[in-house]
């Protein structure tokens, strides 16, 4: 089961849309669990953004009832990642590769040149859920695993996986549900 926890306020129909699209993309149940609080200390005052890695690492995962449960946290505020080769920059989300938790922001969606809130959030969420099953970035611009910073990502509003990623996720899901 994929469990959605909101860390900001979202219209219920948007959350409903996101969960239905994730369910369709992975063929796995996806439910809204409720609201959570951003862990204290995840705020980066200097950049007035949240540290995506800290959120994922410090969030309580007690909504995960089974070992193969995945939790996706949705937030409105901007996210940043710790210092990396590309610097300390804004990100649209962060996932524990092959792990259980991911965070995705709706920040920037609905603006000019970007996808609308519902579609954009569903696509970003599907992308980071994919990373939880070890899916890597994909060259196919129609695939949800295409990187969010690429212009191709905003060109295709459908939440879809290419054949390769669909099959890989199906194998991972089968392996996980023992
Ligand atoms: Zn990615
Ligand atoms: Zn793909």
Image (spheres, rainbow, N blue to C red):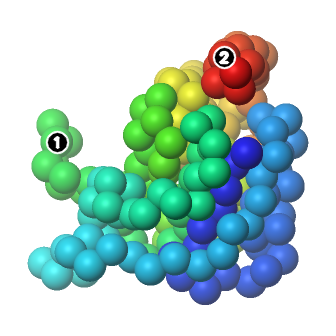
Image side of residue 109 versus residue 21, left or right: left
Residue 152 falls in which quadrant of the image?
top right
Task: Kindly identify the residue that appears in the image at 71 percent across and 26 percent down.
Answer: 177
Image side of residue 33 versus residue 78, left or right: right
Residue 162 falls in which quadrant of the image?
top right
Whether residue 27 is situated above or below residue 64 in the rendered picture: above
Task: Kindly identify the residue that appears in the image at 63 percent across and 51 percent down.
Answer: 65
Residue 84 falls in which quadrant of the image?
top left
Q: x%, y% of residue 72?
A: 57, 55
> Would you name the residue on which mark 2 appears?
175
Whether residue 101 is situated above or below residue 146 in the rendered picture: below
Whether residue 25 is situated above or below residue 101 in the rendered picture: above
- Toward the viewer: 178 or 25? 178
Q: Is mark 2 within 8 Å of ligand 2?
A: no
Point out which mark residue 177 bears.
Answer: none
Residue 110 seen in the current view: no
- Toward the viewer: 66 or 78? 66
Image side of residue 108 versus residue 158, left or right: left
Q: Residues within 10 Å of mark 2 (few under 14, many from 20)?
A: few
- Toward the viewer: 100 or 169? 100
Q: Secondary structure at mark 1?
A: loop
- Toward the viewer: 18 or 59? 59
> Would you name the residue on which mark 1 appears?
84
Q: Secondary structure at mark 2?
A: helix
Whichever of labels 2 and 1 marks the residue nearer the N terminus, that label is 1
Residue 60 seen in the current view: yes
Q: x%, y% of residue 175?
A: 66, 17
């Amino acid at each position: 089961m994929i469990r959605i926890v909101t860390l900001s306020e979202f219209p219920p129909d948007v959350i409903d849309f996101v969960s239905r699209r994730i369910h369709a993309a992975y063929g796995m149940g996806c439910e809204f669990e409720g609201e959570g609080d951003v862990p204290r200390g995840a705020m980066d005052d200097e950049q007035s953004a949240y540290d995506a890695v800290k959120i994922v690492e410090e969030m309580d995962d007690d909504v995960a009832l089974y070992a193969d449960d995945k939790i996706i946290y949705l937030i409105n505020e901007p996210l940043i990642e710790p210092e990396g080769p590309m610097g300390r920059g804004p990100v649209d989300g962060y996932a524990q590769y092959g792990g259980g938790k991911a965070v995705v922001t709706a920040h920037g969606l609905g603006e000019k040149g970007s996808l609308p809130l519902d579609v954009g959030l569903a696509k970003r969420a599907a992308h980071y859920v994919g990373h939880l099953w070890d899916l890597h970035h994909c060259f196919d611009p129609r695939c949800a695993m295409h990187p969010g910073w690429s212009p191709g990502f905003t060109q295709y509003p459908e939440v879809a996986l290419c054949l390769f990623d669909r099959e890989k996720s199906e194998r991972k899901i089968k392996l996980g549900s023992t």
